[in-house]
Amino acid sequence: MATHWKTLSDREAEARRLFSGHVAQLEIQLAIYGNEHRGTFHLFGSAANGAIHDASDVDILVEFPQDKIFAACEFAEKACFERGLQPDVRPMIWASNELRDRALSTGRSCP
């Protein structure tokens, strides 16, 4: 019986598929939370555009009513950690104009 050894490229492709699957699950969960709490999560960067690499994290800007924004940030971080994803979460109001513009023009919004 022949043994199949996974090459580095095989392992990298598998890791990208796994990461992408976790991000897809995360987006569903964020959309549900956003609908329930009248806010929006904006995913951007490598997790949103598919250019996943070894150091990929999940960049999220959080746009919620002021009284709900920190709970929404905490929810997004926890949802990432539950999937083994490294979050980079911040309130939209704390983001620079450049970051905000990039997130809105190149990212995906939930919901």
Image: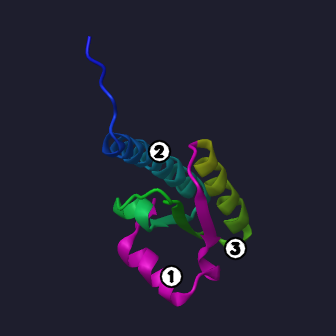
- Looking at the picture, does residue 85 appear above or below residue 95? above
Q: Which residue is mark 1?
A: 99
Residue 78: percent from left, percent from top: 66, 50
Would you call the spot at circle 2 few (<14 residues within 10 Å), some (14-19), or many (20 or more)?
Answer: some
Vertical comparison of 94 with 17: above or below: below
Q: Residue at x 48, y 87 (%)?
A: 98
Mark sitting on residue 66: 3
The CA span between labels 1 and 3 is 20 Å
Can residue 64 be seen from the camera position used here?
no
Does dot 2 land on a helix, a strand or a loop?
helix
Q: Amino acid at mark 2?
A: His
Quadrant containing the N terminus in the rendered view? top left
Give the amino acid type for the residue marked by disc 1 in the picture.
Leu
Q: Amino acid at mark 3?
A: Gln
Which residue is at a point 59% across and 81% down the rendered structure image?
A: 95
**Magenta part of the chain:** 83-111
Can you see residue 99? Answer: yes
